[in-house]
Amino acid sequence: MPWEEGFSDTGTGRRSIRKTCSVLIFIVVFFALVLHIHFGTGFGLRHDWTTTDTRDGDEMSGNDQHGHNGPSKKPDLSRDDGRFLLDAAWNYTAPPTIRVYHWTISEVLASPGAMPKPVLVVNGQSPGPTIRANLGDRIIVKVKNLLRNVTAIHWHGLYQNGTNYFDGTYAITQCGIPANGGTFTYSFIVQNVGTYWWHAHYSTQSTDGLYGALILHSPHEIFRRAVHYDQDVVVMIGDYYSTYSEILLKRFLRYGTGIDGQPGDEPSPDGGVINGISQARCAYIPATDLTLPERRSGGFLSSVDGDASRSPPGQLEQPVINEINDCASNADINYPILPLEGGKSYRFRVINVGSLTSMAFSIDKHSMSIVEADGVDVEPRITERLVVGIAQRYSAVVSLDRKASAYWIRAVMETNSLRYNNPNLNLTTLGILRYDGVAAGTKPPETPAPLSPRSLSDDKDFVPAGRLDAPKATKVVSVTVSMQYDVNGDYRSFFNNTSWEPLTSTSTLLEISRVANSLSYHHPDQLLVSTRGVETIDLIVNSLDDGDHPFHLHGHTFFIVGWGAGRYIGQALSHISPMRRDTVIIPKYSWMALRFTADNPGVWAFHCHISWHAEAGLVMQFANLANQRHLSIPPDVEALCRND
Ligand SMILES: [Cu+2]
């Protein structure tokens, strides 16, 4: 079946059945939402609320933390490694709680690695505060945006059933939270359990540090642990850029040349990061065949706000041969330190917060048992090395059963996504796991420990714990992924023949709510699949590209019902308890079939999680139950579009 752009009906008989179904669904969903919105109990959860007001770090006020040109003062962004070790005394069966967070987002000049760069922080921290809650709790995050750009915060993996307008996807579910002091409040019920994260969903802001962990508990998990553990530890790993992402993005998208003279080549990172600390020493940008406007203006930060990124065809400027290659060779090298208790077991919540590359996670001389992937409990599998794709999460249970000492925690970059040589790239990022009682200054042996060949690296290669078969598909949506030149001669990413660009001063959700027949909403440059009744969709993705892409679907956990090399030409799909997750890597020149039930009203992005690809247009959208009026957008969400 062909892909659909908007809704196309197939016959009057089916139409009347659908109409009846729609009315029934409308009634059910309407009452569920009324209960949900007004009482916060729409999912059969508990009634008596308590409120917890959480203030992480100091709240900043005023604009004095906008440190573009200031001296290289080095705030300690991670503040205290202890904040990644979660309280063991957590109450999993607490009565429903309203958890209120007050976040001030600002930009500081800081040095997560050796080079100072602008870092986007929440309450002075990057990674930002960890949110921790139980199923059925209400999370309220009051955001104040002191950045000089708008922002939006996405709660990665959360269903947001009934609150699509709080999904935090810029220009899709909301307009930006205004720059220079704008405020906005997110409020939603926890409907998921497991390891999640939150991150900015405007441009490449998450690349510069605007993210944090989101750990959601089930009342049962303390009793039903497949593998015993005593405590949770958050480990956020990823690639790291010493240069501000806005500069890299402009050069990546630069007309005709790309960042290294090869259009479509993504910026190569300078190193990795573990819980906000990097050992990257340098900032490297290769020469292109254009004179760089930022070089002419005498400093590459100064042109960020200028509009010098694009030279029209036929007016190419003089070539230069110099690269931007700054290193801080004598700067201190820092390591994140996790002081843990020997004899205990820990559930490491491993999250890839990066922008381009997968990372392999390991701890020297310790194996780990993988028990969860993207919020889905899996049959425990033992490994010594775990490859985590961008935006994916795993729980790895580790027993501290070795000699009391210090051991390296490693995040090793996978190199298959790197398109040009960064001569200073630091592939291995290290942290220190220190058993208690071991002297504070103790460092693990300098020589890299040999890694066992036992490695888990295929993100489809897990078995969900407990059988859950995929429902039958009722609709097939087929898309092709490619990178190519558009009609303007820009090299961009495509779903079919569309390359997404954000709407201005409006969102898809708002636009759909404004047209009389929501199903007819259509944008010529965006791929939007609208459904009327509840459909179970087979999303067939054919990747014609020569790189791997980590794809994420908002608001759903999909079943991975099939995959293979080449294109999908009717190969058999498997519905028998397939692996489920919300982010999966689709390898180069291959296809994958993702099945999900579109029963979650609203507009949901499906996009590549490589920051550079999403910004180059690799985004499509699903409008579930688009014909229904039950998603009335709150006035303060709508108001954002008047100020955007
Ligand atoms: Cu991609």
Image (spheres, rainbow, N blue to C red):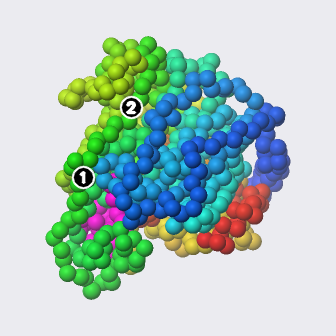
Residue 627 drawn in magenta: no
Q: Which of 247 and 256 is in front in this view?
A: 247
SS for dot 2: strand
Q: What stretch is highlighted in magenta?
A: 241-265
- 341 vs 384, left or right, is right
Read off the residue under disc 1: 328
| Residue 29 seen in this snapshot | yes
Read off the residue under disc 2: 337
Res 184 label: none
Question: Residue 415's spot in the image, x, y percent?
Answer: 27, 46
Instruction: Tell me where residue 352 sits by quadrant.
Output: top left
* Vertical position of residue 221 compared to residue 14: above or below: above
Question: Residue 412's spot in the image, x, y percent?
Answer: 30, 38
Q: Distance between the residues labelled 1 and 2?
A: 22 Å
* Vertical position of residue 608 compared to residue 49: above or below: below
Q: Main secondary structure of the magenta part?
A: loop
Q: Nearer the viewer, residue 501 or 338?
A: 338
Name the residue: 20% across, 65% down.
Answer: 323
Badge 1 vs badge 2, beta-carbon distance below 8 Å: no
Question: Residue 569's spot in the image, x, y percent?
Answer: 42, 51
Q: Residues within 10 Å of mark 1 (few under 14, many from 20)?
A: some
SS for dot 1: loop
* Disc 2 within 8 angstroms of ligand 1 (CB): no
Name the residue: 57% across, 66% down.
Answer: 180
